[in-house]
Each structure stands twice: as structure tokens, then as C-alpha cells.
Image (tube, rainbow, N blue to C red):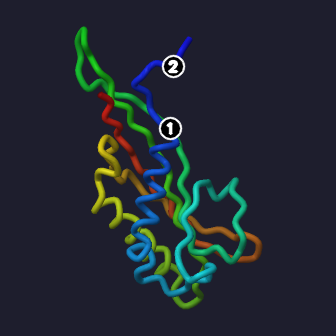
Amino acid sequence: MALTTPYVDYTAIRNNILTLLRDNISTLNSGLTNTIAAGGTVQIIPGEPSITPMPINLYPVIMVKIVNKSEDFLQLGHAGRKRPIVTYNIYGITAEVESDTDAEIMALIKNIEAVFRDNIVISGTIYTNLRDADFGYSANRGVYVDVVKIGLECTVEIK
């Protein structure tokens, strides 16, 4: 069976998210004091912390990974249309700072949220909604890190 249009381009949505984050790098760097990444700036890559290898000199890092897709009816009836909602996780990861363990991760999440609040539309047909945030703490190759996982819903307007 051939692929019919319209369809959801998951890669294009992820790339739009990555581009938006990269275009707002100065906002993302704001207030971070423990930047040990090469070049002293937040690194932005596709992936997930549990499966994407990260060198210890990469922090702070933001990662983007698709999670799921659901669909809602936009219109009911004979000519009804559906509205796809694709959810991505945005992971913000900072290295542990001994003086204040929460300051770095709180600055990073504030910056990530600011980018998406200021850019609800990330392309002509993709609308974003910050859904939730979960905080965690772990060790990666001897470096203690703080992690935030932000759920980002992307509603796709299909013509």
C-alpha cells in the first residue's frame, strides 16, 4: 500500500525543534555558571541520555527524542479530519555543581521553557505546548549530573 498524503514528518518536526533550540543558544546559556562543554556553551543533539553516549566534557547538553503520537478529531462527520499530536522529550543535563546542586538545572529548565513559550509556532503548521517536567539525578562515567525531562507536545496542522 502506498503512503498517502498528508502524513506526519517526524524527522522534520524533530529538526525544527533542534533548529529552534540552536537559534536561541544565547537564551539557553543565560545564567549557567558551570559550563564545561567544549566552547563553553550548551550542546544540542538528538538522542536520549540512556542510549546516546555522552563524553564527560559535553555538559550542559540538551537532547531531543520522540516519545509518542496520538490523534484527535478536529472535525467529526463525513468529511472529518484528525489532528496528530506528536510528543518529544527534551532532556536538559547539567554537571553537578558542589555549591548549589539545583541552581544549574533550574537555570537550564527556565531557559528551555522560555524558548518554547516565546515560540509556540515552530513552523507554519507545528504548534508546541510544554506538557510536564520531571527532575532526576544520576552518575555518568564518574560525573554526577542533574537531568530534567520536559514533555513537549507538537500539534501538527494537516491540510
For residue 121, side relative to residue 146 (left or right): left
Question: Which picture quadrant has residue 38?
Answer: bottom right
Q: Picture coordinates of residue 87 (x, y %)?
A: 45, 43
From the viewer's side, name the closer residue of 145 and 31. Answer: 31
Residue bearing the label numbered 2: 3
Q: Residue at x 52, y 65 (%)?
A: 92
- Dot 1 falls on a residue whose secondary structure is strand
Question: Which picture quadrant has residue 126?
Answer: top left
Tell me the quadrant of the picture where the C terminus can be found: top left
Disc 2 packing (10 Å; few <14; some 14–19; many ≥20): few
- Dot 2 falls on a residue whose secondary structure is loop
From the viewer's side, name the closer residue of 142 and 65. Answer: 65
Question: Where 9 falls versus 1 (above or below)?
Answer: below
Question: Which picture quadrant has residue 46?
Answer: bottom right
Q: Residue at x 65, y 68 (%)?
A: 138
Q: Picture coordinates of residue 57 (x, y %)?
A: 68, 77
Amino acid type of the residue that numbered disc 1 sits on in the rendered structure = Asn
Check residue 68 in the rendering and tell me which mark sits there, or answer none: 1
Amino acid type of the residue that numbered disc 2 sits on in the rendered structure = Leu
Tell me the quadrant of the picture where the N terminus can be found: top right
Q: Picture coordinates of residue 8 (x, y %)?
A: 44, 32
Exactly how many numbered labels are in the figure?
Answer: 2
